[in-house]
Amino acid sequence: MKVFMIGEAANHKNKLAALLKTPCDIIALPREAAYASEYDQRIGRDDVIISLRFSRKDEAAPAFRLLHVPGAGLDGIDIPSLPVECEVCNVFEHEIPIAEFVMAAMLQWEIRLDALRQSFGSDTWSDTYRARVPHGEIHGKTLAIIGFGRIGRTIAQRARAFGVRVVAVDQYAANTEGLADVVLTPDRLPEALAAADFLVISCPLTDQTRGLIGDAELQAMKPSSVLINVSRAPIADEAALFDALSRRVISGAFLDVWYGYPTGADDRVLPSRFRFDDLPNAFCTPHSSAWTDALPGRRYAFIAANIDRLRSGEPRLNVVRAAMPNNREKTSIQGATVP
Amino acid sequence: MKVFMIGEAANHKNKLAALLKTPCDIIALPREAAYASEYDQRIGRDDVIISLRFSRKDEAAPAFRLLHVPGAGLDGIDIPSLPVECEVCNVFEHEIPIAEFVMAAMLQWEIRLDALRQSFGSDTWSDTYRARVPHGEIHGKTLAIIGFGRIGRTIAQRARAFGVRVVAVDQYAANTEGLADVVLTPDRLPEALAAADFLVISCPLTDQTRGLIGDAELQAMKPSSVLINVSRAPIADEAALFDALSRRVISGAFLDVWYGYPTGADDRVLPSRFRFDDLPNAFCTPHSSAWTDALPGRRYAFIAANIDRLRSGEPRLNVVRAAMPNNREKTSIQGATVP
């Protein structure tokens, strides 16, 4: 069995090697191997590919056993271009850092710790102390969470501990584990928008969620409200969001995900057609929310255990497409698929 | 009945007036009235004073009914200088913003949201994305909380929701409400120091806690650890803390409380003999942790209700010294009194 690690996945080659019980050849391939067929003849029927991206345009992909995505999002994977005998698995663990990032964003919005620090100086202390300006609290605020899957629920668990009211929007309304104050079905999204002090987008990008937050939805939000996108950028319409932030239809946004991504080792693309980073009320970050030192260890431990299961014949965990003909459409993504 | 509001308390005169059911004259006095006797002849036996500070050096204080401190800390009140018939009450509500501030500090330390924002630019996005540096998580870290009173427990409740391990140090070891993983008596402080990734000081300043964190205690902490002081500065020895931060005996500190405070309307004092604000690993803020827009409303609602109770003869809440002779030493401050 060979394990091919494509692109940035290959940075974790040593980590995977240390975690695998199954003896494997682990082979790093460049980013381009996700799209180009020139490496395909090296890939065998029993092999595993670990990659965030995979597609074949004009040629059939080689037959292989398992595509393990080293993340949760499947939007980089062109499922129909995969051979039918190929199983597809994904991996989570990022709900922890993403929830921490979202809570940090909400607390940053209310407290502005960096501005408080900048206001402090030994020589000006007495006057600064007397002229302190009060900041905000997240306590008692309302957080609307669009997509109440693993990430949404992990955010809710933390927010609730702060006395934040959680309004979840998800089509699987029963599945709350007591973590939301209210769960609304997607047709009631306008109620969530109107109630939200903070709106977090944590649903997957699908045909149904693309452009879900557009002009009308942003207009339905409070002028004081803040949008936080840690899912995929195109769920919020690019032009509508830029316009709403520019005109202060909403107060601010924390944007960690973007409309354009580089795909190779040295290509250059813009994150958006608009310069969100020029807006003082847009907190733009480079897709960092889940990018923590602890995450790869948790993820590759999961992937190594799944490869060990493949060798021993045990069922894999987090199978998002089974290795069977006529089963290409079956997915079980966590999180809401909001219409 | 007259209500005298001294110094910064007087800023909330209109708020109190709107909340009181009892008809009262509400009179603002300058900061100096906390120390000087020149206003004393205006104060009558049935009156109420609201002030963070009160002392009389050479002369007896006038007889009055209730000193309501509009905060929790009693270190500005010289209890023996008060007339024996004067009841003293304090008020909390600040545990909520202080806990939010502490969580914001911990998340800031691990995520560095401001630095992530600074790293983002439309023109450099592709390279920044490819070269992302992972940040930390608070999940799985250990938080030691010195003083497990209202503030400590409110912090613990939030930290636990993040998967943070909480080690509390408090002499009332049984009183945890399940919010700590471990509660240690003060003699076991060294164990807490050795385990802590974050150390929060949330005990009151007393003769026993002054200088509690000195050279030896800072040496007992991990080099990667971070101290957060939201209580009173002198609990951490000034010179020892400056030295430990300068030499990276510990990694960093969030310091919101100081060694010197202005007492008048225009005096100037230094926050410390040392320039903590020149240290890159000291996050210095101007005693802001509890200074939120929502706090005065919660506090003055509590104070107004206590004044209404005084008029109707009901017992007041949060009595820290009863109006009786020979009872001057009785206090019931929440939080540990760590030796």
Image (tube, coloured by chain):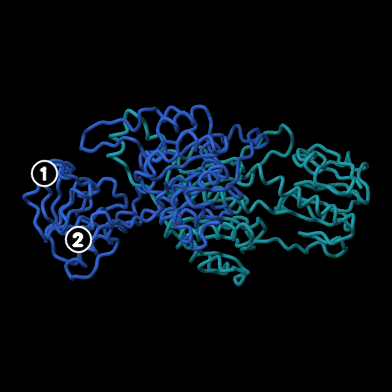
Chain colours: A blue, B cyan
Q: Residues within 10 Å of mark 1 (few under 14, many from 20)?
A: few
Indicate which disc, 1 or 2, sits on the residue closer to the N terminus: 1
Nearest the eye: A53 or A300: A53
Q: Of the numbered discs in the image, which one, if any, rests on residue A311?
A: none
Work out whether residue A280 or residue A117 is closer to the camera in this orientation and state it: A280
Is B199 on the left-hand or right-hand side of B46?
Answer: left
Would residue A331 be found to the left or right of residue B136 on screen? left
Judge from the rendering whether residue A218 lies leftward or rightward of residue A273; answer left or right: right
Residue at x-position 82% and y-position 59%: B316
Number of the label disc, if any, that sits on residue A59: 1
Q: Position of residue A51 (x, y in %)?
A: 22, 50
Secondary structure type for disc 2: loop
Q: Which residue is mark 2?
A: A323
Q: Report, in whole angstroms, how far the alpha carbon at label 1 lies from the one at label 2.
A: 20 Å
Residue B244 seen in the current view: no
Which chain contains the residue that carries disc 1? A
Looking at the rendered structure, the number of numbered marks drawn on it comes to 2
**Residue at position x 35%, y 42% from top?**
A287
Mark 2 crowd level (few <14, some 14–19, many ≥20, 10 Å Cα): some
Q: Is residue A266 visible?
A: yes
B229 to A275, vertically: above or below: below
Q: What residue is at 81 percent from the left and 56 percent from the top?
A: B88
Q: Amino acid at mark 1?
A: Glu
Image location (x, y in percent) of residue B142: 46, 60
- Mark 2 chain: A
Quadrant position of residue B38:
top right
Q: Please name the amino acid that badge 2 sits on.
A: Ala
